[in-house]
Amino acid sequence: MADNIIEISNVHKWFGKVHALDDVSLRVPAGEVLVIIGPSGSGKSTLLRSINSLETINSGQIIVDGMSLKGKGTNLNAVRAEIGMVFQQFNLFPHLTALENITLAQRIVRRRSAEESRQTARQLLQRVGIPDKEGNYPGQLSGGQQQRVAIARALAMNPKIMLFDEPTSALDPEMIKEVLDVMLDLAKTGITMVCVTHEMGFARAAARRIIFMDEGKILEETTPELLFTQPRHERTKLFLSKILTH
Amino acid sequence: MLNREKPVLAPAGLQSSAERQGPNRLAGLDRWWLLFVGAIALAIFLFEAFPARYGVIFRFVVGSWTGGDGVYMTLKLTVVSFVFIVIVGMLMGLFRVSSARILKSVSSLYVEIVRGVPVLVWLLWIYFGVPSLLQAITWLPPALQRIPTFPAAVLAFTFAYGAYMTEVFRAGIQSIAKGQMEASRSLGMTYVQAMRYIILPQAVRVILPPMSNEFVTLLKDSSLVSILGGMEDITRRGREWVAQYFTSFDTYLVVALVYLILTLFFTRMSSAIERRLSVEKR
């Protein structure tokens, strides 16, 4: 039990009349790399966003690192600091340089010194392969570079969990690889990763487990290899045939 | 009072400010210089060529820095009021976008009420109306039964313009993409930290043009205090001159010129600041 860093139990979420999450339960052991796929509107992003409480759930329970998100004594900001999130649209802070994007939360949330924050930021920029871009503003970076800064920004908080919400969907094809390479490297470090992505190559290489969601439910839960070769549901077959034929 | 009801905001503020610096900027610069130099040249010409007719009016209307009247009084009233207006506008604007229902309704009630009543009426009410109410409270010491003109005017302008500034801030804050708040919160920042370090610094760049528009409008509306008496602003000085010498055409021409030079100057200043902010970002 204690091994599960994320425990999602019987979660329901409605957007008006839309049942976005329909009795979803999911356990993620620490250190696992988990991939979630599914058609748009299937609830996969909602599920991911409810893990760090960007969406509040209507019923059910989510426990992250031993803390219930709905618990009275839970400091949501403290929980969120342990969860890094990477967005489809990068969401870098456009008025700050790449370096400042990475140092800001370290200083005001983690209370690190300016010097220490800068050092961490520079190491991370090195790690994501753009050490020479620290003085650039997001508007001066390519999409792939922006997403790598966003990953570095999340990693700077030393999170226990990293959430990826379609990190490559807004990128030009030639930039997808540079972001996936960073994610693959990260997967090898043993950090817990939950990724909503349609990059099947990444799923095969990094994930032990893949989940297929449709209409707010988890339809299949298996290994990437088995899902691609022997999908059990018609809905899964149909979806895979659409994304794999291209 | 132009474009009051819908402050015109630059879309994203970021990319667009760079695009705006095309050939149009030069054209704008030229037109402004022409107008500004023209206005100053006309003022100097009238002053120097007709010292007995215009020179004396200029001296009286512009007033003196040490005397605390004329241009000095107009600027003092405008700047002091504006500081309070920005504070009220920011606070109420933050209330307006907050998720707390009470704060939200307080803010929108304030905006709706204030916007529906002319600035002049607020001014009259606070200067004449409120003291008459205070005088009804007989046990109050006489010193507290009057509101001096300057604080009364600042109060009235802050109250009235604060509502417009609230709308400027609300629109500016709402123009910042939702993802910015989400990214901030996902890093563990509190709502207040996200506002302070991420949302407001970006919103200010968007807000600057409509905000300086409000400043210039306020500078002109400050002339309304001339009806109260007790405050020697530019317009009041003009009216006093007319009352004594009956040269209304000449006097109000001078008054208009002084306002025009001031507003042209401040419009120019604000676009310079705006350009500087967008250059820093690139």
Image (cartoon, grey):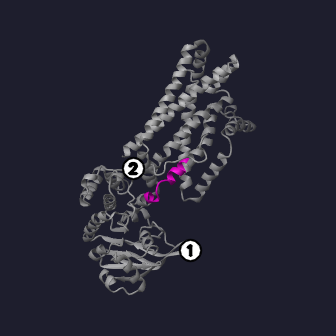
Work out whether A243 lies above or below B142: below
Side of B21 where B102 appears, left or right: right
Q: Main secondary structure of the magenta part?
A: helix
Work out whether B120 lies above or below B168: above
Q: What residue is shown at x 37% (from left), y 80% (from top)?
A: A241
Q: The N terminus of chain A appears in which quarter of the rendering?
A: bottom left
Q: Which residue is mark 2?
A: A95
Regarding residue B151, the answer to whether it shows in the image is no
Side of A151 where B190 appears, left or right: right
Regarding residue A237, the answer to whether it shows in the image is yes
The chain that hosts pointer 1 is A
Q: Depth check: B133 or A235 in front? A: A235
Q: Depth check: B179 or A169 in front? A: A169
**Amino acid under disc 1:** Lys
Image spot of residue A43 (x, y percent): 45, 74
The chain that hosts pointer 2 is A
